[in-house]
Image: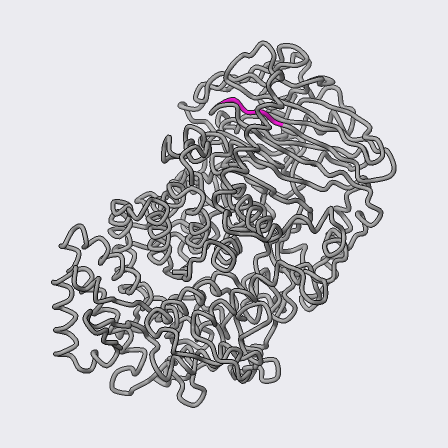
Amino acid sequence: MPENNAEKLRLQLRTDNKGWKKWGPYLSERQWGTVREDYSQSGYAWGSTTHDMARSKAYRWGEEGIGGISDNKQHVCIAFAFWNHKDRILKERFFGLTPAESNHGEDVKEIYYYLDSTPTHSYQKMLYKYPHATFPYEKLIEESIKRSRQEPEYELLDTGVFDKDEYFDITIEYAKADEQDILIKITVENRSKLAAPITVLPTVWFRNTWSWGYENYKHQPTLLGVEKSHIEVNHKLVGHFNLYAENAKDFLFCDNKTNFEKLYKSPAQSPYTKDGINDYIINQKQTSINPEKIGTKASVHYDDVIPALGKKEYRIRFTNTKPDEPFEDFDAIFKKRIEEADEFYDAIQKDIKDEKLKSIQRQAYAGMLWTKQWYYYNVFEWLKGDPSTPRPDANRKEGRNSGWKHMYTSNILSMPDKWEYPWFAAWDLAFHTLPLARLDPDFAKRQLSVILREYYMHPNGQIPAYEWSFSDVNPPVHAWATWKVYQIDKSNNGGVGDTVFLERIFHKLLLNFTWWVNLKDQNGNNIFGGGFLGMDNIGVFDRSADLPTGGHLEQADGTGWMAMYCLNMLRIACEIALKNPVYQDMASKFFEHFLHISGAMQALGENKLNLWDEEDQFYYDMLHKENGDAELLKIRSMVGLIPLFAVEVLTPELLEKLPIFKRRVEWVLKNRPDLAGLVSSWHIPGKGETRLLSTLRGHRMKMILKRMFDEKEFLSDFGVRSLSKYHKEHPYKFKHDGGVIQVDYTPAEATGDMFGGNSNWRGPIWFPMNYLILDSLEKFHSYYGKEFKVEFPTESGELMNLQEAAEGVAERLLALFVRGSNKKIPMYGEYKKFQEDPLFNKNHLFFEYFDGDTGKGLGANHQTGWTGLITEIIRHLHGDGEQTFF
């Protein structure tokens, strides 16, 4: 990037989330229905605070809004509400269904896109499509409840509200004049041939910190209407700000306080509650807003009729200055920030020629940046309750997350999806950091660092999974992500790596690695369990629960993950050892531990029990029964592909720089012939031995690849499936307790209830696993070279090397987003609006997972989290000529 890149210079000013990053898109899109807001006796978070309650209840742990921003501790919030003069409520928050209302789990029922953002949020842009017709809240619920698990979800487009193009395109943009001087523009475009009314309500409010009974937070901040165009914003911690509104009709004030009378039939604690502006606009209730123009929540009130095919622009300025003419330089600043955003992305995308691919990549980056969120959760306070609120049920002290009392989160984190998953998920977060590292390596490094801090990581070394159960076990991918981010940062920094970051993370990962060894290797034989490991319904049983058969599982994926973990830690130790030779001992430790795990995967103990099945030439989980019997659970799933991820190449150049480690490697290979057979080597004349460390070598690797590249099994037109298509005609059946538990190939949404039915690992395509496959294939290629070839696809007669095969898989993943030979974009399925209407299909959604047969997007549809890895795939296939994912 050139030195005169303004956005890059802003990033270099500081590495934390202050300065130019102090204000950003840190609001959630759904705070209702979260664990943090649940103080119910039942522990059913979805019923504790519902969408219908949300407009009336002050939240304890965070705020939500449409297209909103806040400071980095979410004290002051700005977002938008709209009304089409037909709905029964203001559109203050995105609507979606709870698991009880939907046939496939929680799901947002709105259409919106993140269009652009710089890493410092000096410029941001998003688009929301709001129907003229009454929003079909009830119809979406009623029709969804009727549908079975075997039917697709009932979506907003299915209701017909967009059929006649009677809707508003509402574009929300931000441009920062300075660190705390923010210009806001809302553009409402009427896409109909008929004029239509709209109310626009830019809203500023304070997160309620004063109602919970804490002495340090008893001070109540104030919003004060000075005149028709100016609101003073005063907060003891954040400071004094001014909000200027151009040509406002008036200002409406209430308080961000719960409407106890409405929700709980108890005496009101304030005459002007959180829902006061809603009640004033919708019900013309004059007494619900404060005539004194003071409060803790305020909206700028605009009412307009937008002409047919016309548009209207609204301008706001939020600043810690007091300009004489707040809007004099408004357009010039916007123009400058847009130019700087283009300059920033032009540098990143300089070698990508295809404009469509550039658009997909840039919007994926935008989604990654828009889905930052301030995540706040003090588990100790949450368990005991607040001084001024009713004491929670006594059982709460032993209930959900009660073993995580040390946990105190108050950070800007990357969310998987701010509506469907408005909480951090540990293994998702690891994948997020790769695209983020291309934009803002300091932010990416902070993400990996923070969840390993003592106020996140359990004292026993476990990494918290997600708020529904911090004790669930996710795959150990953080060492892998740490190494990837380090490499990206090193490449961007002229070949100079941040070994301080690497060393800091390494020490924390040692604690986590030890936790895995102590807790998940049940028999001490280097074969691991782990539970569901992120792949919710992939097995016969719920792998996070006690087995209905009794006994325990030894998991091919758990063991493969740990072998991969060893090699990631080995590689990190080698890199640190180049500066601090002491770490050669740690490299030796992980080298030997890997060999023991790899050896155990070949044959277990005296009985030679093996996770590898010679008949099927595939890895399976093994069920150990209470009577001592053992049985392979022969499901051809991603579980059996994960051992592929455990691969590392040690070059003679690296080993020569690490003489102590080199001697230990050579000693082990000489004196432990049983382990030496697990290491392949290739002699390079004049250089020495290149060594391949992998759980899969030779025959087994070839057999795994043969099955993975078989279009009748794992290889789809759109990537690698999570379950083999073999099970479509040959479902796996497990006999238990007089019945049969069956696993079928299910390429789309889940047809069962395991994990709520809102995700499916029995056939669909998932980006994180596919990316790890690409990464592993190219590591193998770096060892075997161009002459080693496999059939791709299997039985096609076409031979290609492993790098070419990786690119073949990558091209199939990219095909999800672009028009195929049938002129359709696979991820949009049967929806003509998305396929044919340029006002829809010029923008991009990023789905959680994809149909294993058709490529249709499924699950959360703003999950640029790990589906944001498409940015790396575009970069590799069409970017700067880099020949490797790793």
* Residue 665: percent from left, percent from top: 16, 70
Residue 529 against residue 323 in the figure, above or below: below
Side of 211 relative to 98 (left or right): left
The quarter of the picture where the C terminus appears is bottom left
Res 405 seen here: no
Residue 620: percent from the left, percent from the top?
Answer: 42, 79
Q: How is the image coloured?
A: one colour
- Residue 83 in the magenta stretch? The answer is no
User: What residue is shown at x 49% (from left), y 68% (from top)?
Assistant: 542
The answer to whether residue 145 is visible is: yes
Q: Main secondary structure of the magenta part?
A: strand
Q: Position of residue 851 (x, y in %)?
A: 62, 66
- Measuring from the top left, give residue 644's x and y in whole percent: 39, 72
Instruction: Find residue 262 and report its image quarter.
Output: top right
Number of labels in the image equals: 0
Please name the residue shown 21% across and 73% down the image: 689
Asked if 380 appears above or below 769 in the picture, the reply is: above
Query: Is 183 colored magenta in this rendering?
Result: yes
Q: Residue at x 56, y 77 (%)?
A: 743
Which residues make up the magenta segment? 180-184
Q: Note whether 873 is above or below 618 in the view shown.
A: above
6 or 152, nearer to the observer = 6
- Residue 205 occupies quadrant: top right
Residue in front for this viewpoint, 516 or 316 = 316
Residue nearest the viewer, comparing 23 with 158:
23
Residue located at (67% from left, 57% from top) = 102
Query: In the image as oriented, which residue stretches furthest toward the front?
Result: 686
Residue 863 placement, left or right of 585: right
Question: 697 or 135: which is nearer to us?
Answer: 697
